[in-house]
Image (cartoon, rainbow, N blue to C red):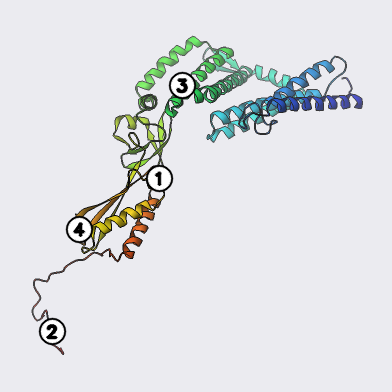
Amino acid sequence: MQQIDAHSLALEAGLVLLCLALAWGVSRWFGRDQPRDSIWFGARIFDGLLFPLLALVFLELARRGMSQFQPVLLLRIGVSAFLALALIRLVARVLRLAFPASALVRLVERTVSWLAWLGALLWIVGLLQPVVQELDQITLGFGKNSVSLRMLFEGLLSAGIVLTLALWVAATIEKRVLREAVTDLSMRKVASNAVRALLLLIGLLFALSAVGVDLTALSVLGGALGVGLGFGLQKLAANYVSGFVILLERSIRIGDNVKVDAFEGRITDIKTRYTLIRAGNGREAIVPNESLITSRVENLTQADLKFGLVTVVVVDGGADVEQVQRILVEAAQAQPRVMREPAPVAHFTNFAADGLEFTLNYWVPDPDKGKDNLRSAVNAAVLAGLRAAGIEIPGPQRVVRVTALPDGHSTSREPGL
């Protein structure tokens, strides 16, 4: 075994620092005006993908050059470390961009990190090759065929990298092309879903071909999948097809206020299988797309963006009708969220049992900011206006008529009794 002296270690340490500084400088130069969510540069340049890739290239070139004259140690460690770091950054950044709200991304990141650092450690200590040979000796039987654990791990690694690159390309197309070319949010959603599904399918086929899987065998799987869709998965398939129909027809769109059965809210997202509807109080309903196709749905913003609210009040029977109407309209107009066009209007709608019934109609352009809070403010203004004008809101009144009394009872009493 060749010995490495202190002078060689110092020279290697200097080369490592030089490679890292050069990688940092190049990344800093190209990443000056890049967005903070960029996969290549990240929020702080060094947490992107470009920095570990450049460091890996420079360290490998330095290792190859220096190994011609003397044995290397630090450069070898640096190459393995930054190879693992580049793989981790690639998977983590792409998955966060493609699935920003997924809780499974964290688990995948940790799994890839542990496997990458374990492989780097085995390569540094020289145990990677014996471990690979041992894995090649362990085989698993599938009918008449047998597959080694080495081939299985290599296939999973290849499939993972290809699918990650496919997600990266799909996210780049959605961010750089679809956002500028497609202005409609629903059409952009269906286009991005179609592009992502197509690229993932192509990436999966490439990964299977690289592992050595005969793609002609997939025809049997396709037939079995068709039978499964015809029986057990028909509801699931109907929801997926309905999702694309909704996005293509644009009968309802993201941002519309709709009413499905007794649930009313704003559409926040349209997935391929279900639609998310958020009510004004924060509750969120998950509605299968098939229900939106086959059942009755009220689109409250299809023709107009305004949303109507109603306040009903009963006042004393001797009140002035015009004065009450004016008070109600002024109470609604005093609220900044109430629309001026169409203007609030109050109608004398009914002779109630306890007085005169009035109905105040007013409209808001932003029901997603809350309806009960605005209705409460209008009611408080109405109450204050009626009290200031001396108009009473009568309580319930009931007349009890006694038709007969038991013997020995009288409806009146003599004085003094």
**Residue at which label 1 appears:** 280
Dot 2 falls on a residue whose secondary structure is loop
- Upstream in sequence: badge 3 or badge 2: 3
How far apart, in angstroms, are the residues tagged by discs 4 and 1?
31 Å
Circle 4 residues within 10 Å: few <14, some 14–19, many ≥20: few
Q: Which mark is residue 413?
A: 2
Q: Is residue 244 left or right of residue 180?
A: left
- Upstream in sequence: badge 4 or badge 1: 1
| Nearer mark to the viewer, of 3 and 1 | 1
Q: Is residue 188 visible?
A: yes
At a point 41% along the width and 49% down the height, the residue shown is 336
How far apart, in angstroms, are the residues tagged by discs 2 and 1?
60 Å
**Residue at which label 4 appears:** 352
CB-based contact (under 8 Å), mark 4 and mark 1: no
Circle 1 residues within 10 Å: few <14, some 14–19, many ≥20: some
- Upstream in sequence: badge 2 or badge 4: 4
x and y percentages locating residue 278 in the rendered image: 41, 41
At a point 87% along the width and 24% down the height, the residue shown is 11
How far apart, in angstroms, are the residues tagged by discs 4 and 3?
58 Å
